[in-house]
Image (cartoon, rainbow, N blue to C red):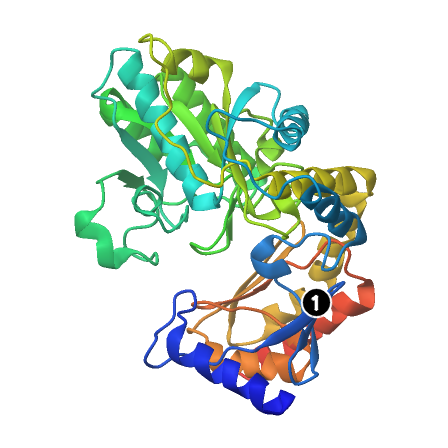
Amino acid sequence: MSSSSASTNWISFERQHVWHPYASMKSPIPVYPVKRAEGVYLEFEDGRRVIDGMSSWWSAIHGYNVPELNTAIQTQIKDMSHVMFGGLTHRPAAQLAEKLLEIAPSNMNHLFFSDSGSVSVEVAMKMALQFWQATGKPKKNRLLTIRSGYHGDTFGAMSVCDPDSGMHHLFSNILAQQLFVDAPTATCDDEWHDSHIEALESAVKKHHHELAAVILEPIVQGAGGMRFYAPEFLRQVRRLCDEYDLLLIIDEIATGFGRTGAMFACEHADIEPDIMCIGKALTGGYMSLAATLCSAHVCDGIHNDGSGVLMHGPTFMANPLACAVALASIELLLASDWKMDVAKIEGQLKAELNVCRQLDAVADVRIKGAIGVIEMHQAIDVELVQKELINLGVWLRPFGKLLYTMPPFIISGPQLSRITSAITQVCAKY
């Protein structure tokens, strides 16, 4: 069998048997086989190269095939690739935990490793529920959140995603029934009026006796709509949680590790959560790893009933390979001038995407840190638009009415211009 026919055979088999995210098995949209990745480029099996403007769903902040991260994995695998974390521990987990608590909000004192962002949200919810059970208030067992949010695909996480416009409305009738208020409309503190917090404040006042926590994405709502909101809204949420004795869970899975211009997006509001979820860019896009951090107050509360056993334990939690590469990724980020890099990306996105505001088909242009969003008036034909973008040498993953980019921090000016030019050309055709 020739190498070309072998290549075709595996692609054909994959198309017939392997599901892709949020896709149909019977009528799937095209997928593009990747042979290798280097820097900001993806190389397809047919030899075409495209600039990855998505950082592999926001995780590959250093780009691909990074020497420092390759070395971290190669060094670690010589000792062990995995060992169960139940009853055992290892240096990579301890070193990573120390580094994470060093860079996290100052009140974060403990953490729980898991293997995906969704699971880190599940753990955060368990922490909140167990906190109130252990402190003698078991009726505080619901969560409050804002619409247009997204927190993952597992059942607990789905229950706090937008129940109407989100991806999980099919399951609404069987999910835990949480409380939702409208998403914030103020996009910066200059636009702030107290009316912007009234809906959430009213819900807290009415339901605080049954609420365990408020959960939300800080400053940037990701897959639920790529919306940005004013830091003052987050400050007001922190105030209300303190006033009405609620825990605050911050989901930094998409926003953490510099994406918004701060190490963690909650820093824009100068607040500290009680519980914080991290993932995605944690390993620089190399392996699946996540963590749920919490304050000493939350940890002590969970132990208040004398047991304090947190009822969760993924098989691959604190995987040594993942921990080793995560530590290397954070050290590489801290050694770089990442704030300047993100600021340059933000400035260039503003300069080169704002022209899209003049297009009739464009409803809005939003830019925050290394995030550039074009919202169209009408839903995007993903299959058609991706094909057009690839022909222009760019890989993006539109959804709904949104065409957006979250490029690796290492991207050069000309490479970023290739992305913004492709976006502008595609939008101009609508």
Query: Would you place residue 40 above or below residue 333 in this image?
Result: below
Residue sitting at 35 percent across and 43 percent down? 157
* Along the line of sight, the residue nearer the viewer: 237 or 314: 314
Q: Amino acid at mark 1?
A: Ala
Task: Name the image quarter holding residue 53.
Answer: bottom right
Horizontal side of residue 67 vs 11, given as left or right: right
Image coordinates for residue 244, horizontal then vertical, percent:
34, 17
Which element is circle 1 on? strand
- Total labels drawn: 1
* Along the line of sight, the residue nearer the viewer: 132 or 232: 132
Residue sitting at 74 percent across and 73 percent down? 418
Residue 394 in sight here: yes
Residue sitting at 55 percent across and 43 percent down? 289
Residue 196 in sight here: no
* Along the line of sight, the residue nearer the viewer: 161 or 353: 161
Q: Which residue is mark 1?
A: 37
Image coordinates for residue 48, horizontal then vertical, percent:
69, 82
Horizontal side of residue 176 vs 397, given as left or right: left
Q: Is disc 1 surrounded by few (<14), some (14 to 19) or many (20+) residues within 10 Å?
A: some
Image coordinates for residue 304, horizontal then vertical, percent:
35, 8
Query: Would you place residue 428 above or below residue 180 in this image?
Result: below
Image coordinates for residue 288, horizontal then vertical, percent:
54, 48
Task: Name the image quarter holding residue 139.
Answer: top left
Horizontal side of residue 162 vs 113, given as left or right: left
Residue sitting at 70 percent across and 83 percent down? 47
* Along the line of sight, the residue nearer the viewer: 330 or 168: 330
Query: Would you place residue 181 above or below residue 357 in this image?
Result: above
